[in-house]
């Protein structure tokens, strides 16, 4: 039976969902995978941190986090001074890095993951920033240290995108892809099809917690561009930043546009795409009219899809219906199991 010490840096919706899932799967992991675990560190941005080499009580940590209380009272050691101190003192085998994304340079998450790898930890994240800004460097450090840098949850929550190519499609070369990768914009466009105007649809998305108070990262296409950059960087082995993705958001799509498309049997979607050609890759995020014969047409609400074209197979599509923190948490759990077995 192998025992792993886990550290959670970031304990918002995703971090808490991961803690719940780990607790739920504890007996199954022991029975099916001969894996036991303890959480030796939980660090937050605003609500303190807990360090305990003997293991933290998950249920108590969740109760404190959900009430907005500080985790410091659970720590058996002096609270860490910063994230770096937290990582160093967590004494973990695996770091789950789930701090907020930085589209511009991937920091400070990239530094968190780098430090974990250099300390001999497996580094797992749902944060897109380090994948597009530091993928090669982090991957090289992981290889040098005999550890894994995994990030399944960064593009389609728990859907197997990166691991699909890493394990199930050996020797396949990705030539192009297209898809719907931003749940918020897809929900907004779906609500507009039901008669709401743009502002009403955005307000609804904010009301249910899908969109941020400032929704520009979604509706201006930045989140989608980061995901496109991540797919291109990793699966096409072509380093690409979000600023290199041609990007147009959905602000200019009116209710009249939606209704006109409906009359023609079409739908507006924020489509992400990339095409490899020689020594360059053309990547784009932009609204497109999608006809009923497209796999993208039926993908509504918060669901997502990506359609791959490789040199050895025909079109291969992965669809995820109604994702949430629980599906993102599963991607993190899957990365944990794939990293250690």
Image: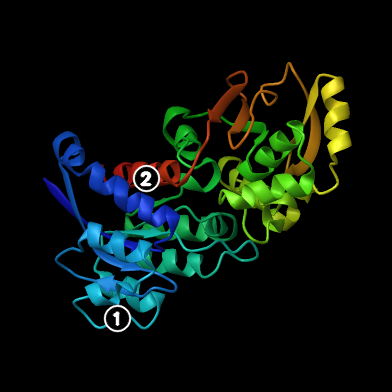
Is there any visible trace of residue 22 in the rendered image? yes
| Residue 234, image quadrant | top right
Residue displayed at 59% across by 60% down: 133
* The residue positioned farthest toward the left in the image shown: 1
Residue displayed at 44% across by 59% down: 98
In the figure, is residue 182 to the left or right of 292? left
- Name the one closer to the observer, 93 or 312: 93
- Name the one closer to the observer, 251 or 148: 251
Residue 217 versus residue 46 in the image, above or below:
above
The quadrant of the rendering that contains the C terminus is top left
x then y, percent, for residue 340? 27, 46
Q: Tag 1's secondary structure? A: loop
Among the two numbered marks 2 and 1 on one chain, the one whose residue lies closer to the N terminus: 1
Is there any visible trace of residue 119 in the rendered image? no
- At label 2, counting other C-alpha atoms closer than 10 Å, the crowd grade (few under 14, some 14-19, many 20 or more) is many
Q: Tag 2's secondary structure? A: helix
* Colouring rule applied to residues: rainbow
Residue 195 versus residue 281 in the image, above or below:
above
| Residue 195, image quadrant | top right
Kindly identify which numbered label has been placed on residue 255: none
x then y, percent, for residue 259? 85, 29
In the figure, is residue 25 to the left or right of 83? left
Q: Which residue is mark 1?
A: 79
Between label 2 and label 1, give the one nearer the viewer: 1
Q: CA distance from mark 2 to mark 1?
A: 28 Å
In the figure, is residue 27 to the left or right of 307? left
- Name the one closer to the observer, 123 or 20: 20
Residue displayed at 15% across by 48% down: 2
x then y, percent, for residue 162? 49, 39
Q: Which residue is mark 2?
A: 335
Residue displayed at 28% across by 67% down: 41
Tag 2–tag 1 contact (CB < 8 Å): no
């Amino acid at each position: 039976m192998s025992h792993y010490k886990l550290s959670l840096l970031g304990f918002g919706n995703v971090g808490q969902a991961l803690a719940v899932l780990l607790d739920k799967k504890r007996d199954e992991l022991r029975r099916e995978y001969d894996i036991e675990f303890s959480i030796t560190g939980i660090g937050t941005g605003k609500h303190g941190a807990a360090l305990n080499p003997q293991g933290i009580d998950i249920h108590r940590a969740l109760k404190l986090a959900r009430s907005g209380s500080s985790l410091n009272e659970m720590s058996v050691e002096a609270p860490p001074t910063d994230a770096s101190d937290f990582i160093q003192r967590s004494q973990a085998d695996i770091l789950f890095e789930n701090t907020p994304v930085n589209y511009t340079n991937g920091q400070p998450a990239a530094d968190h993951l780098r430090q974990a790898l250099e300390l001999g930890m497996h580094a797992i994240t749902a944060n897109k920033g380090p994948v597009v800004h530091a993928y090669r460097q982090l991957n090289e450090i992981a290889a040098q240290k005999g550890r894994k840098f995994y990030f399944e949850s960064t593009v389609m929550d728990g859907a197997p995108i990166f691991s699909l190519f890493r394990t199930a499609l050996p020797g396949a070369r990705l030539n192009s892809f297209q898809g719907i990768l931003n749940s918020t914009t897809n929900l907004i466009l779906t609500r507009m099809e039901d008669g709401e105007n743009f502002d009403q649809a955005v307000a609804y998305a904010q009301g249910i917690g899908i969109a941020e108070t400032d929704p520009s990262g979604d509706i201006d296409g930045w989140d989608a561009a980061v995901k496109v950059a991540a797919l291109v960087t990793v699966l096409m082995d072509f380093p690409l930043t979000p600023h290199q993705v041609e990007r147009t958001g959905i602000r200019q799509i009116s209710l009249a546009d939606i209704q006109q498309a409906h009359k023609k049997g079409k739908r507006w979607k924020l489509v992400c795409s990339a095409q490899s050609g020689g020594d360059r890759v053309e990547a784009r995020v932009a609204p497109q009219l999608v006809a009923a014969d497209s796999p993208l047409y039926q993908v509504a609400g918060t669901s997502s899809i990506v359609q791959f074209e490789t040199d050895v197979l025909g079109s291969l599509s992965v669809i995820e219906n109604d994702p949430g923190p629980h599906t993102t948490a599963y991607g993190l759990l899957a990365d944990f199991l794939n990293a250690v077995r």
